[in-house]
Amino acid sequence: MNLTLRKQIFFSYILMIVFNLIVGLYAIWNFKELNIITNDIILSDIPISENLAKLTDCILAQDLHEKRFINFQQPESESQFWSRSRQFKSLLTDTGNLSGSLKTFVDNLGAYHDKYDELFIEESGLVKAGRLKEAEKISRGEAKINFDKMLLSIKDIDRAAKQQQNQHISRSNALGERALMIAIVLSVVSFAFGIMFALLITNHLTASIERLKAATHSIRSGNYDNLPEIKGADELADLEISFKEMSVRLKELEEMNLDANPLTKLPGNLAIEKELLTRLNETQKFSFCLIDLDNFKGFNDRYGYARGSDVIKWMSDVLTNIRKDLGTQEDFLGHIGGDDFVLICTPERVHAICDRIVDDFDRGIGRFYDPEDLKKGFIVSIDRNDKPTIFGIMTISIAVVNTDRTLIREPKEVALKVTELKQYAKTFPKSLCIMDRRRTL
């Protein structure tokens, strides 16, 4: 059948369009797959890693409270044990929901934890019955075995989660490479029917896939700044947004992990400065509270580092609970280091929060002292000049700067003001909160 030139050109263009449609549809399908994989990493793999860290903290805390309950028979330790147990179960449920492929590992961990709780119930009964040796035997025996199994199970889940994440990344790489090769082949075929169209499609797809491939390798190697730059409003641009969101989130998690205080897991100096700078740049009204423990060094030298660490962790829990009860989701809690904490909240809530901090601290600090020292009301320890000195029972000093009263332009102004207020607060031999009531005109 003879075709006119017009028809030949027409059918040639139709064939070129078909090839171009095939190229475009295949590329879109591959990029959608890449987008799904990226979302799996952001919404599943990363939260699983976070949950595993929290699960480890919970089980270590349960073990600590279990040992304390047997050694000291404190009702608070039993209560804290069960509080951590409930938190553990909640996190375990969330972890199982995030990835069905890890369900067997999660179920095993849940079974070990249930057994661990049952053994604690048995230990608790023995302790309350005065049969301490039997309780200690369970603690050193079956309870210790189940505790070790839980830690091993968490490690197994972590390994499986990391393997799953590596599979996602490998699949993303393979998918990108395959998409690149097929797109090139189809583009070469369509090249015969229209050089200009083929060049445009090939250049666009090749450049985009290369950028995505480079970004994937970059993220896998820990470099989160090499992001793809794809212009447009199609799936490629959506994938670019997903890559950026994933990179930003991974970078934030890495910075938080490096900056967080290893004892309290609270954000450290970098996060505090960033939070303060953000609020100042946004001209928010807030209250900056510097919380400092008085006579902590004397306590630490007298009772040792371990008991001093217990006080710091307890103080962290107290502040966390108060922020949860009286604060808002936007309130910020950080740990500068040592016995210094930072709380940023709204000016409307700062009075109630500070009063609660002082009350909870004064009610709870006594349990960390030996009874004879608590009865005397002081301890004898070494001062900064290595001389024996009398230190009173620890108190707490809170220095507060309110930006609704004082004009503040940069973080160092806040630091200077709260440091001045803190030094003034320390001149009082009791727990108290000092607020900067000077108003800037």
Image (cartoon, rainbow, N blue to C red):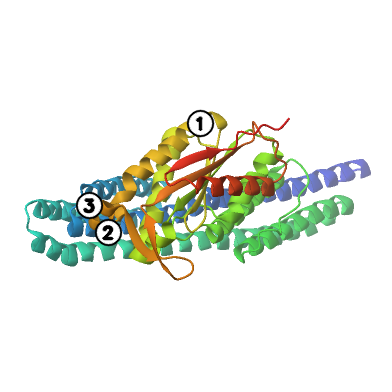
Q: CA distance from mark 3 to mark 1?
A: 40 Å
Q: Quadrant of residue 186?
A: bottom right
Comparing marks 3 and 1, which lies closer to the viewer?
1
The residue indicated by pointer 1 is 349
Q: What residue type is disc 1 on?
A: Arg
| Disc 2: CA contacts within 10 A as few (<14), some (14-19) or many (>=20) | many
Residue 50 showing in the rendered view: yes
Instruction: From the top left corner, tell me how far across and down residue 411 is, in percent.
Output: 67, 47
Instruction: From the top left corner, tell me how far across and down residue 318 is, in percent.
Output: 39, 45
Q: Quadrant of residue 347?
A: top right
The residue indicated by pointer 3 is 114
Q: Nearer the viewer, residue 104 or 89?
A: 89
Image position of 195 (left or right of 435): right
Q: CA distance from mark 3 to mark 2?
A: 14 Å
Do residues under tags 3 and 2 come within 8 Å of each other at their CB atoms? no
Give the residue at x 48% y 69%. Answer: 385
| Disc 3: CA contacts within 10 A as few (<14), some (14-19) or many (>=20) | some
Residue 242 showing in the rendered view: no
Q: What residue type is disc 2 on?
A: Asp
Q: Report helix, strand or loop for mark 2.
A: helix
Q: Nearer the viewer, residue 111 or 333?
A: 333
Q: Quadrant of the C terminus?
A: top right
Disc on the earlier residue, 2 or 1: 2
Q: CA distance from mark 2 to mark 1?
A: 36 Å
Instruction: From the top left corner, tell me how far across and down residue 48 is, in percent.
Output: 45, 53
Q: Report helix, strand or loop for mark 3.
A: helix
Query: What mark, if any, has residue 63 been given in the picture?
Result: 2
